[in-house]
């Protein structure tokens, strides 16, 4: 789930035109598809990358927060001693509440070096006293910050720990719900259940969703820096991800993750992440025409600099709109935006039609 927050220069030109406290049951979709096939009103959750108002996404919260239902503030780390690393700024919480947005701090096993800690997660599953301590610290933190609930981003559990991981998540889910705190969980996208598969295999969609108010399916990173160039979330792949999720979880618990970014691949290997605005800026600088990949349903372009050829695929209003259509057509609870700082005005105008 972690991506760098990008410093994106404002660039407006022709290329940009080419393209609090209520019962947690409120995560259930407010509208259901009528017999005549009327559209479902989606809820929008946005991840906010930073714990205070100094993060780049704050301006978007001020301008477009009225379109959001939830703000998941990323992230508060769980330390090896059971203590928590960080708090959400009161100013950020107050602004969200002022906009009518419910705040969900993101609690994660990401360490101070930015990597998911396998030892911390393993201990949470195996050491009941440690798990109790961390849960109590999270509960106290959420209550003291006057937040609506929690978002759990717990990743890199070993595939052989699937049963332990499921039991641990169900225990925490039940405990948070008894406290009348909403509990949401981020899960990797997948199109089938492969229990031995690294990273995603440990997530048993059917079992872990039972005690969660909402499950955010992170439907991005189909293509990544170590893969050949391609969409981070092609429509055929995302459709398969959604269909698998619907086979294993209630639609009114599923939030489809939308990644508002792309990658710039060098022919020499590797890639760097970039935002929509940054992609347009590069295309404009090198006078690179934009193309539509009809198979992946994604915008891309190529350019050359210092003798090296680059291929850029990125999410734009058209590709994102198609995924919003998918979420609405399938009757999902909503969408989850990664992240506010990567958003842009054209995106919000598209989103406005669905929420």
Image (cartoon, rainbow, N blue to C red):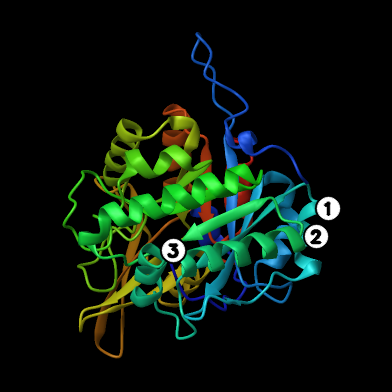
The residue to which callout 1 is attached is: 98
> Does the rendering let one see residue 219?
no
Mark 1 vs 3, N-terminal side: 1
Q: What's the CA distance linking mark 1 and mark 3? A: 38 Å
The dot on residue 155 is none
Residue 158's x, y, as percent? 25, 65
The residue to which callout 3 is attached is: 128
Quarter that holds the N terminus: bottom left
The dot on residue 95 is 2
Q: Residues within 10 Å of mark 3 (few under 14, many from 20)?
A: few
Q: Is residue 20 above or below residue 157?
A: above
Q: Is residue 147 above or below residue 243?
A: below
Residue shown at the point (37%, 63%) measured from the top left: 125
Element carrying mark 2:
helix
Residue shown at the point (64%, 76%) measured from the top left: 86
Q: How many marks?
A: 3
The part of the image, by quadrant, that contains residue 288 is bottom left
């Amino acid at each position: 789930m972690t991506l760098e927050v990008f410093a994106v220069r404002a660039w407006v030109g022709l290329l940009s035109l080419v393209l609090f406290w209520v019962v947690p049951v409120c995560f259930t979709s407010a509208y259901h598809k009528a017999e005549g096939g009327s559209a479902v009103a989606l809820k929008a959750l946005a991840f906010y990358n930073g714990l205070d108002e100094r993060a780049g996404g704050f301006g978007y919260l001020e301008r477009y927060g009225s379109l959001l239902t939830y703000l998941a503030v990323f992230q508060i780390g769980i330390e090896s001693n059971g203590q928590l690393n960080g708090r959400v700024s009161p100013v950020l919480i107050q602004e969200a509440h002022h906009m009518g947005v419910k705040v969900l701090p993101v609690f994660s096993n990401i360490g101070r070096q930015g990597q998911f800690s396998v030892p911390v997660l393993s201990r949470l599953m195996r050491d009941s006293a440690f798990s109790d301590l961390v849960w109590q610290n999270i509960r106290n933190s959420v209550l003291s910050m006057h937040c609506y609930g929690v978002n759990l981003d717990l990743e890199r559990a070993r595939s052989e720990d699937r049963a332990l991981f499921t039991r641990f998540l169900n225990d925490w889910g039940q405990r948070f719900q008894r406290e009348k705190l909403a509990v949401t969980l981020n899960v990797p996208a997948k199109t089938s259940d492969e229990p031995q598969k690294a990273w995603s295999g440990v997530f048993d969609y059917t079992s872990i969703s039972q005690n969660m108010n909402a499950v955010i399916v992170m439907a991005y990173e189909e293509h990544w820096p170590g893969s050949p160039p391609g969409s981070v979330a092609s429509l055929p792949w995302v459709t398969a991800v959604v269909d698998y999720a619907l086979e294993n979880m209630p639609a009114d618990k599923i939030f489809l993750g939308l990644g508002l970014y792309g990658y710039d691949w060098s022919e020499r290997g590797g890639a760097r992440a970039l935002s929509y605005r940054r992609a347009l800026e590069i295309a404009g600088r090198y006078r690179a025409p934009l193309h539509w990949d009809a198979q992946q349903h994604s915008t891309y372009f190529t350019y050359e600099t210092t003798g090296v050829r680059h291929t850029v695929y990125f999410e734009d209003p058209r590709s994102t709109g198609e995924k919003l259509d998918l979420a609405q057509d399938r009757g999902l609870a909503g969408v989850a935006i990664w992240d506010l700082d990567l958003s842009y005005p054209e995106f919000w105008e598209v989103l406005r039609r669905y929420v």
